[in-house]
Image (spheres, helix red, strand yellow):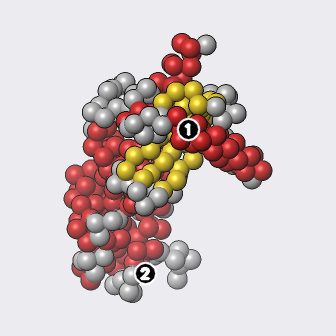
Amino acid sequence: MTDDPFAGAPDAPPQGLAFLELGERLRQRGQHAAAATVALSGLAHYPTVADAHDLLARVRADQGDDSAASRAWYAALECDPDHVGARKGLAFVAFRSRDFAAAERHLDIAAMQAPHDITILNALDRLRGLQPARAPVGTVRLTDPAGGVLLFDMQGMRLAGSVREVADVSLADAAAAEGAGLVREAARVARMLDLGTVRHVVMETADAKIAMLPVSRDGALLIYRSSATPLGRLLGLAGDAARAARDWMGSSS
């Protein structure tokens, strides 16, 4: 008799979907061959369960077989097109092969499917920090009012930009005042809950996605796009606009 609860487990048939937990625990213990056996056995019984393909993919990725991992993650997406884990996994494989554009595409989709998953947003930030400066189609220009970009100070004074294709000063001024209040309040709540520095505030409406982010101690930025825009793309554009805003503030001081 053995005290190891996993002894002999790979040879046992899966009991319902319990094989998912067993396989994951084996994977985390570094028993990759056993975890693969469990995953394949489970898939033989449940070939349409996306999580089973995801488990196999993670095991193959741990084993260094990125090709097999990608096939398994794409199989997971065939079972569940909204499977966030599969998108994150494909992004990881693309990143490991230094295909940063593909990694960003997968993370953009994952961010749209799980807009509040901070691990995805952090991964996008890190990925973009590794890439050389670029000017993709649709790059935001701070002074382009059609882009829906507004720079304001923390007292709510509009500094540059607008929020409509046809400049509406009164609307932009009102948005600046409200935006500054929201950014200050978010910072206050973060301090109260000991959550660290606020990096951005995101809002979604039926027609638009809006991001606000501090660009300095004295200024913040608002950017909006249509509701169809992936959140990761919006935050990427916001980062581009923030850099332009810092340059603008430096040149105008």
According to the image, label 1 marks what residue?
Answer: 170
* Dot 2 amino acid type: Ala
According to the image, label 2 marks what residue?
Answer: 18
90, 11: nearer the viewer: 90
- Give the x, y percent position of residue 46: 28, 81
- Check residue 209 in the rendering and tell me which mark sits there, or answer none: none
Q: In this view, does 92 lie to the left or right of 191?
A: left
Q: Residue at x 56, y 77 (%)?
A: 3
Q: Which residue is drawn at 40% across and 74% down?
A: 20
Look at the image and tell me whether residue 155 can be seen: yes
Q: Is residue 171 left or right of residue 36?
A: right
* Dot 1 amino acid type: Ser
Neighbor class of circle 2 (other Cα within 10 Å; few <14, some 14-19, many 20+) is few
- Give the x, y percent position of residue 14: 36, 83
Q: In this view, does 249 lie to the left or right of 25?
A: right
Q: Residue at x 22, y 52 (%)?
A: 67
